Image (cartoon, grey):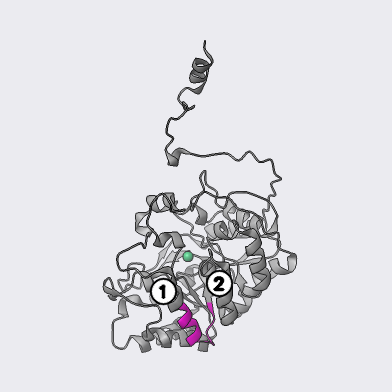
Amino acid sequence: MTRRATFAALGAGALLRAQEKLPLQEYQPKSMLNLPEAKVPRARFPVIDIHAHLSWGDSKMSGAETLQPLATAGELLPVMDRKNIRTLVNLTGGYGKALEEAVRLFPPGRFLNFVEPCWARAAAPDYPRFQSDQIERAHRAGARGVKVLKTLGLYLRENTTTGPLVKIDDPRFDPMWEAAGALRIPVAIHSSDPRAFFLATDRFNERFEELNAHPDWSFHGRDFPSNEQLQQARLRVIARHPRTRFLCLHVADSEDLAQVSTWMDKHPNMWVEIGARIGELGRQPRAARRFFDRYQDRICFGTDAVPKGTETPQQIFCDELYEIYYRFLETEDEYFDYAPWPVPPQGRWRIYGLGLPESLLKKVYHDNAARLLGL
Ligand SMILES: [Zn+2]
């Protein structure tokens, strides 16, 4: 048997002949590095996960006050107990009757809920007043913050789903931002998205596979604003409402920590959260470490965890998810996966642990969020 024939027989279809093309989605390279692997089953300190989705509110902007729960408290608590999670914050608690239902299903003690604006009414002449009143009612019903999805800036249009996009800094929302500040509850706000989502989905796009699998996640072209325009609009809101604290989700703009730093220096009411961005922070571990040092009093722990679905493997609520976050924050492990998935789902890279000291861990895991939430 020739050498070539032996290899062909051994391969049984798995080995590729030289120069044969391998489809990108089938490529699953295994790292050959031999490195220590720390297992961190429990966080060093009790955790407040300030960014989870335990329910969906009015995600279709229909005006319906109905809640779609994604899990029961009973299903969540065993994972929380194992992972040392004291409090899980359900950001998408809807509004009105839906919010009341969220507070009933996920009661204070181990859970907290945020209220969402009623986008369906945003075109009504009395909306500014209605919306600020609604925040006050929600606060009385148990809401501990306001959550603004990227709906504002990227989906909400003048006639809800048609017409021009409504801008993040549109003055009709000013009374709402002010109401949150007056009640001393934070606004958790997600604007924009990874920068690659605003670029063409082509061979230069570092998130090609993610966007190719989810073409509707792309904000390239059409009438979408740029990442920069969205960020600037949000910053104008933050500047205009200095007594309202804005928790900018996903590290605000995780791919440019130098930029985020200049914003946080300028706006003491700007905070950040790290959910679904350890893939970004962990591939720039030295810049990230400096960022954590400098803003150690305004960074909150969050995961963007969702108890249902497999669309976003980096966000599935489970033990493994938290173990990866803890490993990232607590250890100096190198080159490990940021999601429990065979192929890195957001982009083909791996991450490095920050090895934060105990004093920082305590703030990031718990104390900062407790201060922000007034606990
Ligand atoms: Zn989220």
The residue positioned 66% from the left and 56% from the top of the image is 353
The residue lying toward the viewer, choosing from 321 and 12, is 12
Q: Position of residue 350 (x, y in %)?
A: 58, 50
Indicate left or right for 343 with 45 as reference.
left
**Residue 321 appears in the picture as rendered:** yes
Point out the image quarter for the C terminus.
bottom right
| Label 1 with label 2: CB-CB less than 8 Å | no
Distance in Å between CA atoms under marks 1 and 2: 15 Å
Q: Is residue 232 magenta?
A: no
Assess whether residue 241 is covered by the magenta stretch.
yes
The location of residue 177, given as percent across then percent down, is 46, 84
In this rendered view, identify the residue nearer to me: 255 or 306.
Answer: 255
Q: Quadrant of residue 279?
A: bottom right
**Looking at the image, is mark 1 or mark 2 earlier in the sequence?**
1
Front residue of 286/319: it is 286
Left or right relative to 173: residue 285? right
Picture coordinates of residue 47, whole percent (x, y): 64, 66
User: Which residue carries the number 2 mark?
Assistant: 260
Label 2 sits on a secondary structure element that is helix
Residue 229, label in figure: 1
Question: Which residue shows up at 54% across the image and 61% down it?
Answer: 277
Residue 140 at x, y = what percent? 48, 84
| Residue 22, label in figure | none
User: Please, what is the three-letter code of the amino acid marked with disc 2?
Assistant: Val
Circle 1 packing at 10 Å, graded few (<14), some (14-19), many (20+), is some
